[in-house]
Image: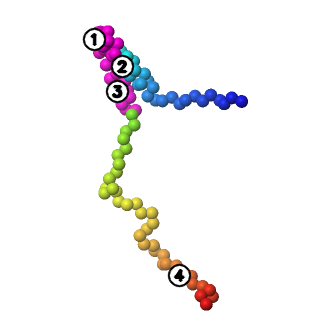
Amino acid sequence: MRSPISIPKRRPDTVATFVLIVGIVDAVMGSVSGHGSLRVLGLVVMGSAIALHWPRSPKPRRVPSGRSRSPQRLLPAKTSRPALPLSIDTAKQS
């Protein structure tokens, strides 16, 4: 029995990556062939691809400094209930 074909999830930055590759190819072709307009077009396309990708890139998380946050207490410092009496079994002591 064959396993079902799994379709990979589409990444959200595929369009920006494709546009960046097209811009790189245009810039390289313009530089090699000596066509300045193609080189400039490639650089413009690369810049627009970076501008498309920039807002979608993950932001680095800020590490909170230890001094600004007070420690989180899970239990209250003092309880309102009195302490339980110790259970001493007098029959086992003798």
Type of residue at label 4?
Pro
The three-letter code of the residue at mark 2 reads Ile
Q: Do the residues labelled 1 and 4 touch (CB within 8 Å)?
A: no
Q: What element carries label 2?
A: helix
Q: Which mark is residue 24?
A: 2
Q: How is the image coloured?
A: rainbow
Mark 1 or 4, closer to the camera: 1
Circle 3 or circle 1, nearest the eye: 1
Q: Report the Cα–Cα distance between label 2 and label 3.
A: 15 Å
Quadrant in which the C terminus appears: bottom right
Q: Is residue 35 magenta?
A: yes
Do callouts 3 and 1 mark residues in contact (Cβ within 8 Å)?
Answer: no
Q: What residue would you read off at disc 1? A: 36
| For marks 4 and 3 on the same chain, the one whose residue lies earlier in the sequence | 3
Q: Does the magenta stretch include residue 76?
A: no
**Picture disc at residue 85:** 4
